Image (tube, helix red, strand yellow):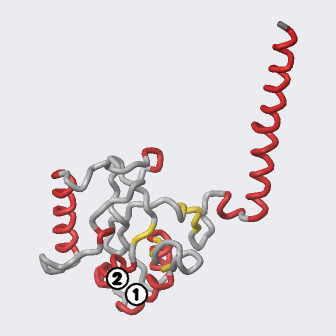
Amino acid sequence: MRTYIRPALGSMVLFTLLLGLAYPLAITGIAQTLMPEKANGSLVRDRSGTAVGSALIGQNFNSPAYLHPRPSALAAAYDASTSGGSNLGPLSDTLASRIADGAATLRTELNLPADYPLPADAVTTSASGLDPDISPAYALLQVPRIAAARNLPVGKVDAALKAATRGPLLGFLGQTRVNVLKANLLLDSLSGEAQ
């Protein structure tokens, strides 16, 4: 019996030390050395250096002075501990009703005609419910509301949103997007920021 137990225990201890301790420490060290910002959660900081969120996790901004994010399907909106989609399919009456209601509310909020076509991300949720980015088209729709709430020229707000816009990775992977948190920090840095 000892001839079987001793090698099994030895292998367990060896692989626990190797894969449970040495490998994670090596990968953490490499990540901290090569890309410390990403390894530490892609934190976004305000002007005073205080962490206000992550560039990877959406936040709920309701004030008219801020860029609004993509809707969240989570019961507690933008709660990262409960990440997940609604799992409603394209034939779901619940989904169709939620999209129609959201579109009507958004058109009213932005003073748009009842039949105005909206970008898909303005009324649909992402798979995680935590999408930190919106499309430039959805961001542009919000410019007049933000400018009015902040008492700023439309061009100044538009320039801030364009500064927060990122193109596809390597020029072809993904889509052009606006990070909502970074855009709102840029808006706060403008003169005449909302209170």
Front residue (pair 171, 182): 171
Residue positioned 35% across, 65% down in the render = 70
Circle 2 SS class: helix
Tell me if label 2 and label 1 are in contact, CB under 8 Å: yes
Please state which amino acid type lies under the numbered disc 2.
Answer: Leu
Q: Quadrant of the C terminus?
A: bottom left
Q: Looking at the image, how many numbered discs can be counted on the residues?
A: 2
Please tell me whether residue 52 is drawn above or below residue 143 in the rendered image. Answer: above
Disc number lying in front (2 or 1): 2
Q: What number is the disc on residue 39?
A: none
Residue extending furthest top? 1
At label 1, which amino acid type do we have?
Answer: Asp
Say which of 43 and 167 sits in front.
167
Q: Which residue in the protein does label 2 denote?
A: 140
| Circle 2 crowding by C-alpha within 10 Å: few under 14, some 14–19, many from 20 | some
In which quadrant of the rendered view does residue 23 lie?
top right
Q: Is residue 36 above or below residue 64?
A: above
Residue at 43% in and 50% down: 79
Crowding around mark 1 (Cα neighbors within 10 Å: few <14, some 14 to 19, many 20+) is some
Q: Position of residue 118 (x, y in %)?
A: 25, 75
Task: Tell me residue 85's x, y (percent).
Answer: 36, 51
The reply, left or right, for residue 149 in relation to residue 93 is right
Q: Is residue 170 above or below residue 86?
A: below
| Number of the label disc, if any, that sits on residue 158 | 1
Image quarter for residue 96?
bottom left
Question: Image point 61% across, 58% down: which residue?
Answer: 41
x, y percent for residue 141: 30, 80
